[in-house]
Amino acid sequence: MHTICPGAKIIRQPKPEMFDCPKCGTEVEIWTDEVKGSCPKCKTVVMRYQDQSCLEWCKLAKNCVGERAYNNFMKNRSQTIKEKLLEDISLLFGEDKKRIDHAKKVTEYIQELLEKEEGDYHILMPAGILHDIGIKVAQEKYGSAAGDLQEKEGPGVARKLLLRLGMGLEFIDEICEIIAHHHTPGIINTNNFKILYDSDCLVNLQEEGDTGDKEKLRKTIDRTFLTPAGKEIAEKIFFS
């Protein structure tokens, strides 16, 4: 009989693993409760991928390994998923660097908003990277004027990518729901949605570049942002 869940043993009892530095070939030690290490020779940051675990779906996960170990695992797992999804959208969008950069900037604002707003990094990072994932399929189906039809196509594309990475269905469902409505506030009122929506708006406002009419911009900010932190960042960007 197991006294410790075998799926959680590696979380409870981390051990070192060795990886070759991709730049100089030197061995880099990274413990199993970490996702990156620094090459002792050339200082290159080396990543290891956090595999999926029963901790992602088991309701007793926190009690099994402890809250600190659970939170550390989820942080590492989120970083792994983030890197994998960035690779996926780079392949999908190809030479469309604008779309790739947009997704990266949205995730940067998500991280900034999470310092002041309550939200789930494990949900928001994938949502931030994939929120516009449906636009390519929508354009292929409906032409360049596909518009918000990307909300219709996005969840299906995102679900396939997330299932391949082994994310729990509960997480996937929430991410896909956010993607399906990310241009239509009011349908979903979770903090996760509000943080994603505000992060996207912050990037969109800067990309649009039409900020000459300060009075109009002030009204846009007042009626657009859903979180106090989102509004605060917008005012800092455009009025400081």
Image (cartoon, rainbow, N blue to C red):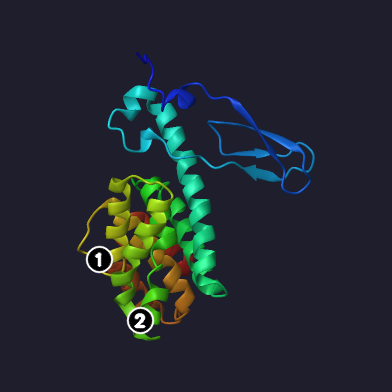
Give the SS element for disc 2.
helix
Furthest-left residue in this view:
187
What residue sits 40% from the left and 48% below the top? 114
> In this rendering, is residue 99 above or below 32?
below
Numbered tag placed on residue 185 in the rendering: 1
The CA distance from mark 1 to mark 2 is 25 Å
Query: Few, some or many C-alpha atoms within 10 Å of disc 1 (few <14, some 14-19, many ≥20)?
Result: some
Furthest-front residue in this view:
1
User: Can you give x and y, in whole percent of width and height, for residue 220 in the image?
Assistant: 33, 73
What residue sits 45% from the left and 45% below the top? 78
Q: Amino acid at mark 1?
A: Pro
User: Can you give x and y, in whole percent of width and height, for residue 20 in the image?
Assistant: 71, 40
Left or right, 192 with respect to 202, comes to: left
Q: Is residue 231 visible?
A: no
Q: Which residue is mark 2?
A: 141
> In this rendering, is residue 86 above or below 218?
above
Query: Few, some or many C-alpha atoms within 10 Å of disc 2 (few <14, some 14-19, many ≥20)?
Result: few
Give the SS element for disc 1.
loop
Which mark is first along the chain, 2 or 1? 2
Q: Amino acid at mark 2?
A: Lys
Numbered tag placed on residue 90 in the rendering: none
Q: Quadrant of residue 157?
A: bottom left
1 or 2: mark nearer the eye: 2
User: Can you give x and y, in whole percent of width and height, for residue 2 in the image?
Assistant: 37, 16
Left or right, 48 with respect to 189, comes to: right
